[in-house]
Amino acid sequence: MFKGKSLAVLTSVLVTVTCVVIYLEWRAVQDIRKGLSGTELKSLFAKGRHALLHRMVISGGHSWGGPAADTRGPGPPAPAAPAAPALRGASGASTTVLSVAGSDVELRPDLRISTELPSFPTPREVRHPSCIRDFDLQTLPRASLVIPYLNETWAQISATVASLVAHSPLEVVDEILFIDDGNAPEWQHHHELLSLHPKVKVHRNEVRQGLIRAKVIGAALIDSPVIIFMEPHCVVSRQWLEPLLEQLALSKDHRTLVMPTLDIIPENNFNQYLPANHHIGGFDWTLTFGWKDLIEKRNSSYTYPDPYPTPALSGGIFGIWKDNWEQMGTYDINMTEWGGEHIEMSLRTWRCHGRILVVPCSRMGHVFRAKNPYIVHVPEVMKNTKRAALVWLDEHLEDYYKKVPYARQIQAGDVSERIKLKESLECESMDWYMDNIYPELRAELTPKPHHLRTAHH
Ligand SMILES: *[C@@H]1O[C@H](CO)[C@@H](O)[C@H](O)[C@H]1NC(C)=O
Ligand SMILES: *[C@@H]1O[C@H](CO)[C@@H](O)[C@H](O)[C@H]1NC(C)=O
Ligand SMILES: *[C@@H]1O[C@H](CO)[C@@H](O)[C@H](O)[C@H]1NC(C)=O
């Protein structure tokens, strides 16, 4: 009697538990369905339930809805948001202001259930609906990611890797290669990095080589046809890599460079995500990078979210064919530490028969920092910039010196090898670049007409 009763209780408890488990799994699948595409779902089922639940955890964020902020199509160009904080280009090119599309998107750090990957705040969907589609991975070139790091926090590095693992088609990724650029033991994180994912690799420079040479070293260590240079303080969005690889695949001569749209994660709030507007990147006569006009304003026949040309790279986040990287002369390895290389790369790419595209369907949040976590010596940055100027400005070198008079005194070293490179690649002139790629820069040379200067009486 007593036994029978407890058996009945036990049975009903078991039935209830089973029902709850089935319900939770069903809900998990529904949640994932909302957030993932068909192929993603299929591959998740192939990987089994653990991967499914795991993926649910790390791809959380799709459940808080509301209209995506960045689905307005071409529309009227949004004015630069006055509320936007002063931000630097990726890899901290300069102080510059990016405007924000739509409203501020708050994120919530995911609840952490997985023991495999650290949590990271997942951006709400900010892509244009037409970006969300299946990609045929067979048609995409294989890629490796190269990520130098120096004195970066584990919270940000691990969030970067977790988002990469969650949101990249790992079938086409060979390696995620970290370059430890002479970190002190407390900043090395080798063991933690390697245990995040089998595709994560670490190469250590015993002595700091600087960001520029660290990338040249990293790129030489990988075998994939495509290199994606990344930074360790980003959170990538779903399908960030596919549209970049697709654009590279369309480049028959391999001379296209691609950049994702860099959305903004403010330094003081890692859980915030501000979708960036569609600015072109440029620079002034001090060779300082800045975000310039919106592409819609620059070209009225532009249709969002098509890839669009940008006169300059904002910094160190871009994808490039490895053969092109090498044929084009990688970076100037006599540039030290950090800075200036993105302007040099921009001038070299456009003028030596390549082009640079921003791909608005590819998005990642980037922590724009007011200050580098490591020491950057201003004279080194000046030296790098002067090297770029000496090689690339032609008869406009004086226009740079006029803006930066003390650059005349800086010892920039021998640039003859880079000038030889420019000649052997049969690159176009600075005037060609200003006529064809970046007319706004020439406009800065001419003083504003009198009537404009005295418009306010
Ligand atoms: C403007 O955009 C259209 C559509 O993307 C493109 O075909 C055209 O070449 C662009 N014009 C210029 C001057 O860049
Ligand atoms: C780098 O500097 C060294 C020493 O001045 C010089 O021999 C070498 O040619 C330079 N390399 C480049 C790429 O400028
Ligand atoms: C990195 O941090 C260490 C302290 O752990 C500091 O001594 C070092 O100067 C920093 N490196 C750079 C290049 O700023």
Image: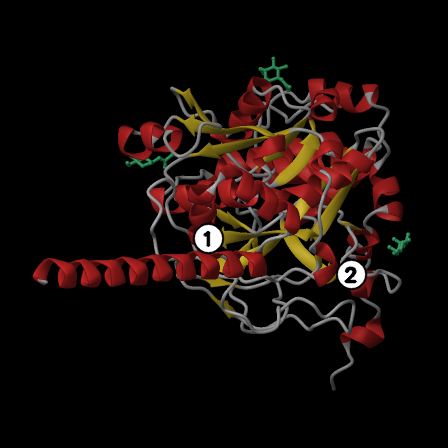
Name the mark on residue 101.
none
- Rounded to the nearest whole Å, what is the CA distance between mark 2 and mark 1? 30 Å
Residue depicted at x 83% and y 61%: 303
Q: Nearer the viewer, mark 2 or mark 1?
A: 1
Q: Counting other residues with Cα less than 10 Å from the Cα at mark 1, is it few (<14), some (14-19), or many (20 or more)?
A: many
Would you say 148 lies left or right of 8 here? right
Give the residue type at disc 1. Met
Q: Position of residue 281 (x, y in %)?
A: 69, 52
Q: Position of residue 188 (x, y in %)?
A: 33, 30
Query: Which element carries disc 1, helix, strand or loop?
Result: helix
Please name the residue shown 50% across and 54% down the image.
Answer: 368
Q: Residue at x 50, y 56 (%)?
A: 29
- 203 and 25: which is toward the camera: 25
Instruction: For the N terminus, give its image quadrant.
Output: bottom left
Q: Position of residue 11 (x, y in %)?
A: 25, 58
Q: Quadrant of ligand 1?
A: bottom right
Q: Nearer the viewer, residue 323 or 435?
A: 323
Quarter of the image with the C terminus is bottom right
Instruction: Specify whether 71 is left or right of 429.
Output: left
Q: Nearer the viewer, residue 231 or 245?
A: 245
Say above or below: 96 vs 158: below
| Within-10-Å neighbours for mark 2: few <14, some 14–19, many 20+ | some
Up/down of 249 relative to 289, above or below: above
Label whose residue precedes the other's in the sequence (2 or 1): 1
**Residue annotated with mark 2:** 304
Looking at this view, name the residue that lies furthest to the left: 2
Q: Is mark 2 within 8 Å of ligand 1?
A: no
| Farthest-out residue, front | 1
Q: Amino acid at mark 2?
A: Tyr
Q: Which mark is residue 56?
A: 1
